Image (spheres, rainbow, N blue to C red):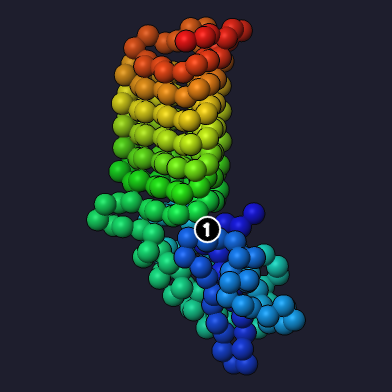
Amino acid sequence: MCQHISLKVVRQDDDVKVYSLLNEDSHTAIHKKRNIRDNDLENQVSVEVVPVNDLTDCSNWELIFDTPKPKWWNELCEAKVRKEVKKLHSKYWNAKTKTYTFKGDLTLDNLKSIPKGVTIKSGGKINLSGLTYIGERVTLNASNGRLELDNLRSLPEGVTLKSSQRIAANFLTSISKGVTIESNRAIFINSLTSIAKGVTLKAKHIHFSQFTSIPKGVKVKALYVYIKGDLLLL
């Protein structure tokens, strides 16, 4: 699976060229649309530059090679890669509104934390399966795909999660007040044991199997709610 941000680096004599596509993380798409030759693979390498601790500052993002790092890789290669990433990042990140916008599928499964007040918008799915911390008033919006939050344990005040498909947060144990979770399909929060009054849950199907009834003060709008040992039709 290609991760954010994906690049193709091609050696040309003593120089290198770095190829990318705006709002596209597929190496295959980059290879095709940038007309990169197929008969010179020893002088090409696919690179992913991924955020781990901070999505808002790309200067320390990690480089991941799809194949072993080529012998010709040097400081010039990395400098050009960093320059290209900085250019792409400036298109996605709006520091004034604290919004990160990517029009395709957004794979951020190495990212560990999101600071308070940040909004992440994707034109496809958002994979944040490695996320362990999320700040207050964060908004995550996967407008045409699922939202994966498989390692997150708690949601602080004011967080908003939206997805056109499923929202998977099965290790989530607590949700604070003012949180809104909306999905056009299903919400999976099967490890949840604590949920504050005033939380809003909206989906066709909601799965929270640790509860025997819908908690008081929680606003639920759904066709089906799966609770411990039972199915509720609303």
At 52% from the left edge and 70% from the top edge, which residue is drawn? Answer: 20
Name above or below for residue 25 compared with residue 232.
below
Residue 3, image quadrant: bottom right
Residue 122 position, x and y percent, is 45, 48
Quadrant the N terminus occupies: bottom right
Q: Residue furthest left?
A: 96
Residue 77 position, x and y percent, is 55, 80
Residue 42 position, x and y percent, is 73, 80
Horizontally, is 202 left or right of 70 in the view? left
The residue type indicated by label 1 comes to His
Name above or below for residue 9 compared with residue 23.
below
Nearest to the observer: residue 117 or residue 113: 117
Residue 15, image quadrant: bottom right
Horizontally, is 27 left or right of 125 in the view? right
- In the picture of the structure, the residue carrying the numbered disc 1 is 4
Nearest to the observer: residue 224 or residue 155: 224
Name above or below for residue 135 compared with residue 79.
above
Horizontally, is 207 left or right of 40 in the view? left
Circle 1: is it few (<14), some (14-19), or many (20+) Cα within 10 Å?
many
Q: Residue furthest bottom?
A: 13
At 58% from the left edge and 72% from the top edge, which residue is drawn? Answer: 33
Regarding residue 213, the answer to whether it shows in the image is yes
At 56% from the left edge and 36% from the top edge, which residue is drawn? Answer: 150
Regarding residue 171, the answer to whether it shows in the image is no
Q: Residue furthest right?
A: 39
At 47% from the left edge and 65% from the top edge, which residue is drawn? Answer: 22
Question: Which SS class for mark 1?
Answer: loop
Residue 181 position, x and y percent, is 41, 29
